[in-house]
Amino acid sequence: MKTPLEKLRIALSRLVVILALSGYLCTSSYWEETKGKELELFLFFIGMVMVAIASMGRMWCSLYIAGYKDRTLITKGPYSLCRNPLYFFSFIGFTGIGFATETLLFPLLCVLVFAASYGFIIKREETRLRQLFGSTYDEYKAQTPAFWPRFSNFSEPENYVVRPIVYRQHIFDALWFVWIVGILEVIEGLKDIGYIKPLWCIY
């Protein structure tokens, strides 16, 4: 069962995605209109690389927490790099989706919205973990950065027990950035053949 904080995070993420797709429906890229194809292609490429990193990173995180969340304090693998690697990879994914729109405004907005909303969620999450694991979490917090990875901290076990049923469910959640890029491409195709008429041109 998902915690209230998880439900809030999921609802917030869905709201951001809906608003972003609605905005994308109504806009076109300035770089396409001005025939800046090289920059347009570069922005999309950056977006795809970031989405790929985010999806693989989220699957990596899920491998460690699937079936263990709230039962064990996970401190190995991606959780040895920072305390919130799942959110870190989500940040990369959100920003990558922004770049996949082939604009500069959307990734900037994604960064600002993520910083404004997920900062609160991370603080609430850490308060909950402190209540669950007490001084063990305090020691982990003292040694591990909150968000930006510290690669010198990296450690992983030689063996790790994975719960396939739970992990399989997590895989679908890890890939939703890829699905959103697919939706963006469908919308772009509908714009190209004239079924959708953008109202504004943005950078």
Image (cartoon, rainbow, N blue to C red):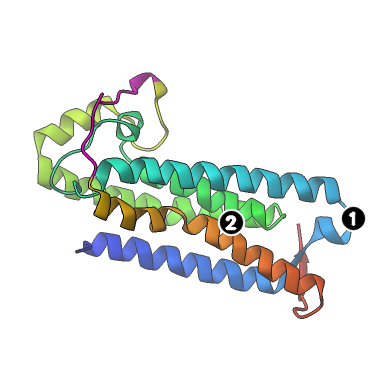
Q: Residue furthest front?
A: 164
Q: Residue 35, labelled with which disc?
A: 1
Q: Judge whether 161 appears above or below 144 on screen.
A: below
Is residue 161 part of the magenta span, yes or no?
Answer: yes
Q: Position of residue 177 (x, y in %)?
A: 51, 56
Q: Amino acid at mark 1?
A: Lys
Marks 1 and 2, how far apart in space?
24 Å
Q: Nearer the viewer, residue 113 or 166?
A: 166
Q: Amino acid at mark 2?
A: Leu
Give the total of numbered labels.
Answer: 2
Say which element carries label 2.
helix
Q: Which residue is mark 2?
A: 109
Q: Judge whether 22 appears above or below 92 on screen.
A: below
Is residue 201 part of the magenta span, yes or no?
Answer: no
Instruction: Classify residue 1 by image quadrant.
Output: bottom left
Question: Image point 24% across, 42% down: which residue?
Answer: 162
